[in-house]
Image (cartoon, grey):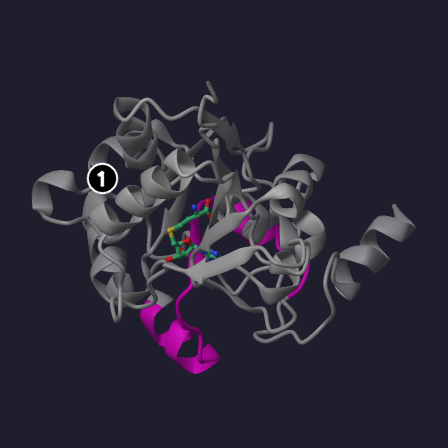
Amino acid sequence: VTVARVGTVRLVGAGPGDPELLTLKAVRAIASADVILHDALVDRAVLAHARVGARIVEVGKRGGCASTPQAFIGQLMIREARAGFDVVRLKGGDPFVFGRGGEELDELAAAGIAVEIVPGITSGLAAPASIGIPVTHRDCAHGVALVTGHAADARDEPDWAALRASRLTVVIYMGMANAGAIAAKLARAGWLASTPVAVIARATRTDQADVVTTVGDLEPAIRAGGLASPAIIVVGEVAARAQTRETVSTAPRGLRPAAETRLARA
Ligand code: SAH
């Protein structure tokens, strides 16, 4: 009697963009996978770790168009694992930070599939770090909140007043389409118009672009800088600690020159 082998599914974080920000565990999972289902946000160089013959399927969505239904992704993973294949579900950043990793885990667990989670570096932490912004700082930020700027409906919105009262650094994902409305909500919740804000688009990629502005100037600054999604918006005193005020950088991966120079001198 032969017992059919059931494959595993690994929910793997691909990090923010720079292929060098993958974990060793992610590289190993990608290299051994039979099937890789990845988001649009995942860099080609990350997929270069796949073995010859691996099936690579893009199931991502970008800007709302041509999205793969979530139910289809779940069914595909279950089917492939039951057929004995090792599946990697590769997601930008960390799979459990606005990545629907929780939903996919539930679905796989309900189907009795073995799941391994490989955390990744989330863009909300990598983006500010790429321009020298510490999201916590003993002088001015005693914690950080990661929130969505794109709530499905008003009930799912972050409680901006509570966030204001918390005095935490606020890191906003998926906020670019609503940046003007978000700035108005921040102002209404009590943030001063002069509160520093950093916007970092395509963080850690070779075409990263960023701007440091204020709550009052957020929307015009985004427009002037030509910044677009995917981007992270960082609200709080720490944003003023950015190491460069250039609006656009084309510097290569890793630490950018301004931060590098600064660190070398320190
Ligand atoms: N799981 C991902 C987030 C997915 S939600 C993570 O942990 O990073 C998609 C949002 O992530 C985008 O709208 C944007 O706000 C942010 N994002 C992802 N990659 C980014 C990058 N390289 N630079 C800036 N923001 C990014």
Identity, as a three-letter code, of the amino acid under mark 1:
Pro
The stretch of residues the image draws in magenta is: 219-244
Give the vertical position of 5 relative to 237 (above or below): above
Which residue corresponds to the image point at 15% horizontal and 40% vertical from the top-left?
Answer: 156
Would residue 245 be found to the left or right of residue 92 on screen? right
On the question of residue 227 being in view, the answer is yes
Residue 127 x, y percent position in the rendering? 56, 53
Instruction: In the displayed orientation, state which residue is furthest to the right.
Output: 265
- Answer with left or right where residue 155 lies relative to residue 64: left
Please tell me which residue is depicted at 56% across the width and 48% down the height of the picture. Answer: 14
Say which of 188 and 119 sits in front: 119
The residue carrying pointer 1 sits among few (fewer than 14), some (14 to 19) or many (20 or more) residues within 10 Å by Cα, namely some
In screen coordinates, is 30 left or right of 85? right
Q: Nearer the viewer, residue 78 or 127?
A: 78
Residue plotted at (67% across, 59% down):
52
Residue 72 at x, y = what percent? 24, 50
